[in-house]
Image: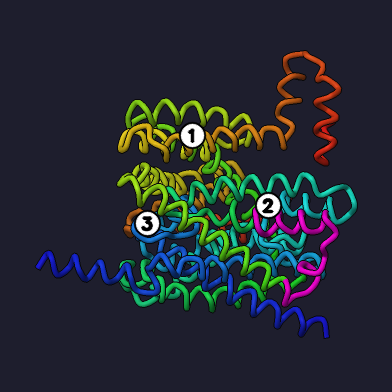
Amino acid sequence: MELIEVAIKSIIIGALVGVGVGAGAARMFHAPKAQGMGAFRTLGELNACAGDAASHFSFGLGFFFNAWASSVGAGAFTQDVDHRIIPNWAAAVLMRKGRRPEDTLHNPKKMAISGGIIGIIVVAFLNLTASAIPESLQAIAVHVLVPAANLLINPVMPVIFWLAALDAGKRSGFWGTIFGGAAHLIMGNAVPGVVLGILIGKGVDDSGWNKVTKTLLISVIVLFILSAFFRGFDIQLLESMYITPPEWLLDFHKLLGLEVK
Amino acid sequence: MTTQTESLEKDMYKSFWYADWSFPIFVALLSAGIFAGTHMYYVYKIGAFNDVAIVAMLEAGIQGAGYGAAAAFGASFLFARVLEGALVGILDIGGSLQTGIGIGVPAILLASGITAPVENFILSLITGALLGALVGYSILAIRKLTVGQSNSTFGADIMMGAGNASGRFLGPLIVISAASASIPIGIGSTIGAAIFYIWKKPVAGGAILGAMIFGAIFPISLE
């Protein structure tokens, strides 16, 4: 009985997620004119496969084994189901007859339909097969794809975005450097900071210090302060400077439900 | 001729699949699925749309160790990504929906003792859809107030370029990782990448296939 329940729920979830991811990914190719959703890295990887069905499929397959292992082991699909497996496989299905990416991968309607179908299959499969996957393939995913993806996320992407910020002009370079460094310290990855730095720099380049750009800068600073606080960065900073954190600060963290060791 | 294509393009960006007004619908669909995925994890311990490390934060809360970490982590990601998504034209679904709505919001709800939206499948779909629509409309509102008002794209072209450039690194990175995993896998990956390059196919795909074929013949242990 539970199996049927899981199967029905998986089909509904897979369809919803697949349609959203498919349409969002295709709309990314029309950004910023149309608002897309996905990720910069998804966009880059989809382009790296250059509209070749076999490459889209094998790229998705590598991450599929990893997602499968993680689902069997910990019940967590990994973010790759939405970021990599569904968009790449949906693209592979559409391109199987060698059609141009402009007519397939970049078309939200076609990607939503094929994404929905792939979503149903992938989610139902992952939820229903708690049995083991071939260990040799799981090992490839863990030893080859995961390190490569981790290298891409850190340090390759931060460096590329950072250099793009430096090349984009003085303001982007300055704010990108400030927020990039702060983001790596606080969040562990510089990309969000560099992106926000480019936003501010280019915004000011194009339209000066007006209400919009000022609000943007202030909200970014507030965001950094808040996430630093909630991740206990303030306490770590004091401790790494060999200063004992004051009792009231520790109490303040406790008050908000965050125990700091 | 040019004016004709321009007006055609203008019409395209007004149609359902490209328009701004349909964006919240797509976010709502995806978000409903992701939130229901968290429901699956809560009930059946399988199906959360996130990485092990992040799901572990929610699991810590379910086990009674406090939801603070998951809630703060998810909420701050959601806020940052909504702001960024509106300005650059691409909403990062990993931070905003998978971590923010899929982990952060359930953590906040469960911490306040509201379990129904996570325990009940139908309610989880509705909650996810409503939150997703809210995110979608917030993004459109921020877009109107910023990009629409000031004629600036806030460097979106620069970031698209950087995003594309980083994808190119993937092929060589896979060969390097494969070569560090074991000698046969490294050889397979190198051959696969070289063949795909000659065939004018993306190097990343060949590198993975080569690594998998040689990895199946000469398996390595998972440890």
Callout 2 crowding tier (Cα within 10 Å): few <14, some 14–19, many ≥20: some
Q: Are marks 3 and 1 on the same chain?
A: yes
Q: Chain of mark 3?
A: A
Q: Chain of mark 1?
A: A
- Pointer 1 residue: A217
Residue in the picture at 36% in, 42% down: B155
- Pointer 3 residue: A31
Callout 3 crowding tier (Cα within 10 Å): few <14, some 14–19, many ≥20: some
Q: Quadrant of residue A68?
A: bottom right
Residue extent of the magenta highlight? B100-123
Image position of B26 with respect to B197: above or below: below
Q: Quadrant of residue A182?
A: top right
Whether residue A128 appears in this view of the structure is no
Q: Quadrant of the N terminus of chain A?
A: bottom right
Q: Quadrant of residue A101?
A: bottom left
Q: Nearer the viewer, mark 3 or mark 1?
A: 1
Contact (Cβ within 8 Å) of mark 3 with mark 1: no
For the residues marked 2 and 1, what is the alpha-carbon distance in whole angstroms?
A: 50 Å
Q: Earlier in the sequence, mark 3 or mark 1?
A: 3
Q: Is residue B104 magenta?
A: yes
- Pointer 2 residue: B220
Image position of B163 with respect to A194: above or below: below
| Element carrying mark 1 | helix
Q: Is residue A136 magenta?
A: no
